[in-house]
């Protein structure tokens, strides 16, 4: 993906959301917002939007002196954990537990406070369980799963990580070994080791961090250890729109699970905003 004209107002909107979460001091909000405009001005439009949003949020954290999303991340981890028992029951009673857990994982992708100021988690769950996927490469995923027991699972947002845990547990019940990946340090409401602990995902499977605080997965900015793990992965499940932005076209066997939450990405995919996708990378092997 590249940056389109419509990305620029979104950059500003994301900055405003972060600033309102981070401080009630209106003069400080304005001062920081003006400073982020330099990162927006320097946007490399040939690269995915995630590059610019990384610079914006880095500047906001530096000037605030804290992570503005810390409290809301923890809040939504707890909200999702309260839903966990009932969602596990839905999966266990399903005629196809794997497909149901995939749908729930995609539903969890609505928990994105980099873009939204509020989310309807339960409404999205109902929609995910009862609506068709706009892109449905489930049969290709089943084929890929038959060829390997090792999966690298790239998580996305706090709160959403509980939904990922359900999918990971379902995959593990099929004999798969999962390595889940979180960010090396905070950025927006993306998962870190703290969220892996709060969601109890770290009690379920191996969790590593990618050594980066970039939005999405910008491989050149990740640690050498993660790059080696990524390179040797035979099957990758990638959650979230930013991971799709930054990894689409990568010559790896990747399945993207996400909701197209902005007009630009939706237009690029020829889909309606809010569409739910299980999409195989066009350059995937197998």
Image (spheres, rainbow, N blue to C red):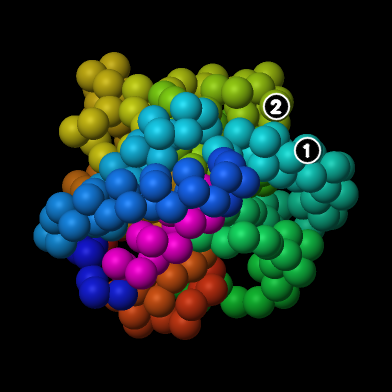
Q: Residue at the location (72% across, 65% down)? A: 120
Q: Nearer the viewer, residue 117 or 274?
A: 117
- Figure check: 74 above or below 259: above
Residue 138 horizontal side relative to residue 184, left or right: right
Q: Residue at the location (40% across, 76% down)? A: 263
Q: Residue at the location (18% across, 57% down)? A: 41
Residue 93: quarter of image? bottom right
Locate residue 195, reporting x and y percent.
62, 29
Q: Nearer the viewer, residue 11 or 88?
A: 11
Locate residue 260, reporting x and y percent.
46, 68
- Tell me, yes or no, if residue 197 can be seen here: yes
Locate residue 190, reporting x and y percent.
50, 40
Q: Which residue is mark 2?
A: 198
Q: Residue at the location (53% across, 73% down)? A: 274
- Figure check: 244 above or below 208: below
Locate residue 1, reporting x and y percent.
23, 62
Asked if the residue at tag 2 contacts the one at tag 1, i.e. Cβ–Cβ closer than 8 Å, the answer is yes
Is disc 2 surrounded by few (<14), some (14 to 19) or many (20+) residues within 10 Å?
Answer: some
Q: Which residue is mark 1?
A: 78
- Figure check: 134 above or below 230: below
Numbered range of the magenta stretch: 7-19
Q: Secondary structure at mark 1?
A: helix
Residue 279 horizontal side relative to residue 39, left or right: right
Q: Is residue 34 magenta?
A: no
Q: Secondary structure at mark 2?
A: helix
Q: Earlier in the sequence, mark 1 or mark 2?
A: 1
Residue 109 horizontal side relative to residue 261, left or right: right
């Amino acid at each position: 993906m590249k940056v389109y004209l419509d990305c620029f107002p979104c950059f500003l909107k994301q900055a405003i959301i972060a600033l309102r979460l981070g401080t009630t001091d209106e003069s400080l909000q304005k001062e920081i917002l003006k400073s982020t405009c330099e990162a927006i001005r320097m946007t490399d439009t040939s690269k995915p939007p995630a590059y610019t949003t990384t610079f914006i949020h880095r500047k906001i954290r530096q000037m605030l002196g804290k992570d503005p999303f810390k409290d809301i991340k923890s809040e939504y981890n707890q909200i999702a954990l309260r839903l966990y028992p009932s969602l596990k029951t839905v999966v266990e009673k399903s005629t196809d537990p794997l497909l149901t857990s995939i749908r729930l994982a995609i539903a969890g992708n609505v928990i994105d406070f980099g873009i939204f100021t509020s989310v309807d988690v339960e409404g999205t769950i109902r929609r995910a369980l009862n609506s068709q996927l706009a892109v449905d490469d489930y049969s290709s995923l089943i084929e890929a799963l038959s060829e390997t027991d090792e999966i690298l699972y790239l998580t996305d947002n706090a709160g959403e990580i509980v939904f990922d845990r359900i999918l990971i547990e379902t995959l593990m019940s099929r004999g798969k070994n999962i390595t889940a990946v979180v960010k090396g340090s905070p950025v927006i409401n993306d998962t870190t080791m703290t969220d892996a602990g709060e969601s109890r995902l770290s009690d379920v499977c191996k969790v590593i961090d990618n050594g980066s605080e970039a939005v999405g997965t910008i491989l050149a900015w990740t640690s050498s250890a993660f790059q080696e793990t990524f390179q040797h992965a035979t099957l990758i499940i990638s959650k979230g729109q930013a991971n799709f932005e930054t990894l689409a076209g990568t010559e790896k066997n990747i399945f993207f699970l996400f909701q197209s939450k902005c007009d630009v990405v939706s237009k690029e995919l020829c889909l309606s905003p809010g569409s739910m996708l299980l999409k195989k990378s066009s350059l995937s092997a197998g």
